[in-house]
Image (tube, rainbow, N blue to C red):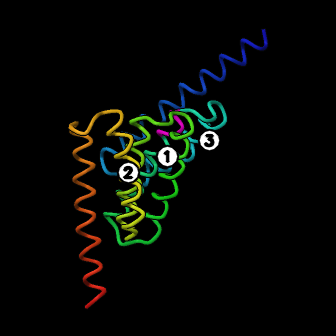
Amino acid sequence: TENSFSKVIVKLRIVQTVTFAILSDSYRHFGDHQRAIEIWKLNTLPVYKEELGDHPWTATILHLIADSYKALATESSEDGYAEQADMYCRQALQLRGKLLGFHQDTARSHVFLSDVLVILGKFQLALDELNKALEIQQELLGPQHKITADTVNKITDLLVKIECKNKTKKT
């Protein structure tokens, strides 16, 4: 029937898109972030949004795009990469928050956003994101878990950066 044919086409389209996502991830792992971003934005993200809508896979692609922009921001002096990382990271975080709520993937997204905000020099906002992540991690993983401890260490490091920045302003 026409309906089952349409379902097969959609499934084939998603399988093809997953292949593009895997290809992009290979480019990312080998440092070709521009190519990875191009494939994700042209071949993966539009299909996921159209066929899957609000879905964890869509959030993952948004996160991967943000991660590649973050890598470009740290590797290059060109403007705009960190801002792009921020934008895609916030989209991934918003989607994960909506779909998963109080979940470790949501906490990871808060930590990742804090990393991007540090690159942008927005230390207080970065600290706020780390505190949101820590709240989730302490509840879900416990205060002694390595991931929770890593977030506490990031908070400590960031507080030192904020203090140094404040001392520099005073002098």
Kind of residue indicated by mark 1: Leu
Which labelled disc corresponds to residue 46? 3
The residue located at (52%, 41%) in the rendering is 97
Would residue 22 be visible to someone looking at this image? Answer: yes
Q: Quadrant of the N terminus?
A: top right
Q: Earlier in the sequence, mark 3 or mark 1?
A: 3
- Indicate the position of residue 21 as horizontal and vertical percent values: 46, 36
Judge by depth and name the residue closer to the eye, 170 or 2: 170
Q: Are marks 3 and 1 in contact (CB under 8 Å)?
A: no
Marks 2 and 3, how far apart at CA:
23 Å
Where does the magenta region start and end?
A: 56-60
Neighbourhood count class around disc 2 (C-alpha, 10 Å): few under 14, some 14–19, many 20 upward? many
Hey, which quadrant is residue 76 in on the image? bottom left
- Indicate the position of residue 143 as horizontal and vertical percent values: 25, 39
Mark 3, secondary structure of its residue: helix
Q: Is residue 89 above or below residue 125?
A: above
Mark 2, secondary structure of its residue: helix
Which labelled disc corresponds to residue 93? 1
Marks 3 and 1, how far apart at CA:
18 Å
Kind of residue indicated by mark 3: Pro
Q: Quadrant of the C terminus?
A: bottom left
Q: Are marks 1 and 2 in contact (CB under 8 Å)?
A: yes
The residue located at (60%, 21%) in the rendering is 11
